Amino acid sequence: MKRSVLLGLFVTASMLASPSFAAGDSDSLCDTNIKTIENAKTQYQGSDSQSKIEASLQQAKAHQASKTEEGTKKCISETTQTIQEMQKTNKDGKNS
């Protein structure tokens, strides 16, 4: 239960901060989402979701490393999708 609340706080903070970062620099949104995933992924150790989360995180970092506008967009897309999947998994009670 505590982990669910903690993940919810991380995700909520990330989503609330996202519009303010996106207005100034979309690369900051990518960074913020990556940090959110890194902070929350410890709750998924030993679960089926852990490998998916780790693969998505590595892919997002690769997109970010390209330092192009398209790479940044792909990073944001990848991380946002992963955060949503983490929320769904947590909401469904599969990882309590």
Image (spheres, grey):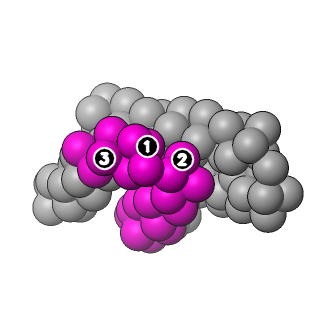
Return the residue at label 2: 26
Note whether residue 59 is visible: no
**In 3D space, how far apart are the residues under numbered discs 3 and 2 (Cα atoms)?**
10 Å
Along the horizontal axis of the image, is 47 left or right of 90?
right
Magenta stretch, main secondary structure class: helix
Q: Quadrant of residue 76?
A: top right
Return the residue at label 3: 20
For the view shown, which residue lies furthest in the right direction?
A: 66
Q: Position of residue 36 (x, y in %)?
A: 41, 60
Disc 2 residue crowd, few under 14, some 14–19, many 20+, Cα 10 Å: some
Q: Are marks 1 and 3 in contact (CB under 8 Å)?
A: yes
Residue interval drawn in magenta: 16-44
Q: Quadrant of residue 88?
A: top left
Residue 67 is one of the magenta-drawn residues: no
Q: Secondary structure at mark 3?
A: helix
The amino acid at mark 2 is: Ser
Q: Position of residue 81 (x, y in %)?
A: 54, 34
Along the horizontal axis of the image, is 9 left or right of 84?
left
Q: Which mark is residue 22?
A: 1
Q: Residue at x 67, y 38 (%)?
A: 73
Q: Which mark is residue 67?
A: none
Disc 3 residue crowd, few under 14, some 14–19, many 20+, Cα 10 Å: few
Q: Residue at x 27, y 33 (%)?
A: 91
Q: Residue at x 73, y 57 (%)?
A: 64
